[in-house]
Image: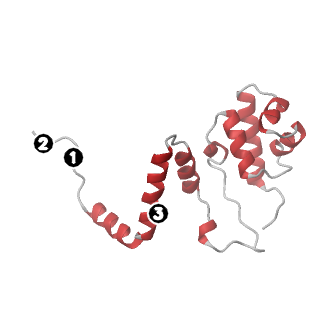
């Protein structure tokens, strides 16, 4: 996998600039807020340097935008054949990003823990969960309002 910025990196940079300008922040102001130089922010915005996910989270927080805003409708980039990750565990999809963003917005730690336990239980019993979902999908939809 190449470390050189690609079209998706450039698009994320453009969106950082767009949201920064919407918030009427200068590059130095945003850079100071997230602990980088304004030159580094400029390189991110121009797609010259790739941005680490952790730093992107800080930028999203500073700009008060959801992480998904940086990725929504970005065309997928075909990976190069060298050193591709074959493990599906590392296939971060749009759904995974949405799930992660939603999960992190849950403010109560005990609730996050319970949701994590639920997801882990589903994973552990995925076959049974798929069968249950198939049964649910075969059942006719029930009206929320009883017939009178």
93 horizontally vs 55: left or right: left
Q: Residues within 10 Å of mark 3 (few under 14, many from 20)?
A: few
How far apart are the two marked residues, 2 and 3, measured between alpha carbons? 39 Å
Of residues 21 and 101, which is closer to you in this image? 101
Q: Is residue 26 above or below residue 1?
A: above
Q: In the picture provided, is 21 more to the left or to the right than 136?
A: right
The quarter of the picture where residue 105 lies is top right
* Sequence-earlier tag: 3 or 1: 3
The numbered mark at residue 9 is none
Q: Nearer the viewer, mark 3 or mark 1?
A: 3
Extreme residue toward the front, this view: 110
Residue drawn at x 74%, y 39% as measured from the top left: 16
The residue that disc 1 covers is 143
Asked if residue 3 is positioned above or below residue 81 in the image, the reply reads above
Image point 84% across, 40% down: which residue?
A: 36
Residue 147: which numbered mark, if any? 2
Q: Residue 22, image x and y in percent?
A: 71, 28
| Residue at disc 1, secondary structure | loop
Quick check: marks 2 and 1 in contact, CB under 8 Å?
yes
Q: What residue is pinned by disc 3? A: 120
Give the farthest residue toward the left. Answer: 148
Contact? badges 3 and 1 (CB < 8 Å):
no
Quarter of the picture holding the C terminus: top left
- Residue 145 place in picture, x, y as percent: 19, 40
Farthest top residue in view: 24
Q: Earlier in the sequence, mark 2 or mark 3?
A: 3
């Amino acid at each position: 996998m190449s470390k050189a910025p690609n079209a998706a990196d450039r698009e994320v940079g453009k969106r950082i600039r767009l949201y920064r300008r919407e918030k009427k922040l200068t590059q130095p102001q945003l850079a100071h807020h997230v602990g980088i130089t304004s030159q580094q922010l400029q390189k991110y915005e121009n797609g010259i340097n790739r941005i680490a996910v952790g730093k992107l989270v800080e930028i999203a927080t500073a700009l008060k935008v959801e992480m998904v805003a940086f990725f929504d409708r970005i065309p997928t980039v075909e990976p190069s054949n060298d050193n591709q990750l074959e493990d599906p565990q590392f296939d971060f999809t749009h759904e995974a990003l949405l799930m992660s963003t939603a999960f992190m917005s849950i403010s109560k730690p005990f609730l996050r823990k319970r949701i994590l336990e639920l997801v882990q239980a589903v994973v552990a019993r995925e076959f049974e969960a798929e069968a249950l979902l198939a049964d649910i999908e075969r059942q006719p939809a029930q009206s929320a309002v009883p017939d009178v």
